[in-house]
Image (cartoon, grey):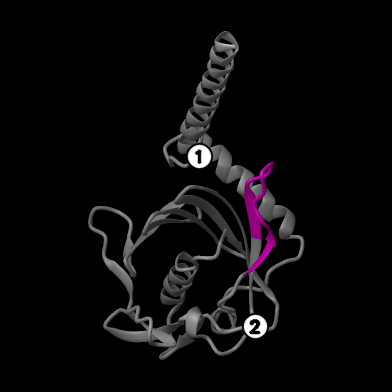
Amino acid sequence: MSALIRLLFSVLMLGLFITGVFFFIANVLSSLAFNPASRAWRELIQKLRTRNRIRMENAPVPFNTESLTHLSGKPKILKKAGWRDGVFEGVYHTIYQEPVAYFAGQKNGKTAAIVVQAADREFILRKKGKETEIWLNGDPYAVLVDGVLLSSGRQGKMLAKLEVDTELRQWPVIIGQGESATLTNLDRAVSPIPRAVGLLRNLNPEEEQVLLALTIAMTDNLR
C-alpha cells in the first residue's frame, strides 16, 4: 500500500514539475513577444495589423474635428480574447455608429499590445502597468504616465495633461498653455453612448492628434 502511495506521489510531483516548466516557458515566450526590441514583438504587431486590415473592408470615416468631437467614449468589442486565440478586436465609432478606427490587441498579465488603425494613421500601444508607450505610423510618439502625455525621447515635452477627478463627469485636458478640452469620465457618464471628448477651443491638426492619442491611451476596456 505504501509503495502505491509513493508511486502516486511521484507521478503527482512529476506532473506538477512538467506543468511548472510549461508555464515558465510560456511566460518567457510571452514576455519576448511584448518586448519592442524583439522579433516576436514585430511578428505580433504584424499579426494584429492583419486582423485590422480585414476589418478595414468596412472603411472608417476620415479623422478630423467632426469625427473627433463625435467619437464615442465606449469602443465596441467585436471579438473577445479566447483560450485558443488570445487576440481581441474592436472598433472606435462615433455616437452615430460610424467606424473611426479599428483595433486589435493581445494581453499577457498587466502588459498589452494594441494596434489602432484609422483611415490615415496607425497607433501602436504598449500598455504596461500604469505606463503606456505609443508609436505613430511605426515611429515612437509619446508615453502616457499618470495622466501626463510626454513626447518620446530623452527631452520629452508635455503634450497633454489630464486632470483626473473621480467626482467630475468631465476631466479637463491641458494642451499648450491652458485647458483645451475635456475627456468624459465614463464611470459618471449619463448617456449610454457618451461622447469621448469635448473641445473648449479650436485645435490645430497636431493638437487634435494629441487628443486622439490621449483618448485611446486612456481607454481601459480594450481587452
- Residue drawn 53% across the image and 25% down it: 16
Label for residue 95? 2
Q: Residue 82 at what x, y percent from top left?
A: 67, 48
Quadrant of the image for the C terminus? bottom right
Q: Earlier in the sequence, mark 2 or mark 1?
A: 1
Residue 47, above or below 174: above
Residue highlighted by disc 1: 41
- Residue drawn 62% across the image and 84% down it: 192
Residue furthest left in the image: 155
Rate crowding at label 2 as few (under 14), some (14 to 19) or many (20 or more) other CA atoms within 10 Å: some
**Stretch in magenta:** 76-89
Residue furthest front in the image: 1
Residue furthest top in the image: 3
Q: Amino acid at mark 2?
A: Ile
| Quarter of the rendering containing residue 127 | bottom left
- Element type where label 1 sits in the image: helix
Q: Is residue 83 left or right of residue 25?
A: right
- Element type where label 2 sits in the image: loop
- Residue drawn 42% across the image and 84% down it: 182
Q: Residue 185 at what x, y percent from top left?
A: 46, 81
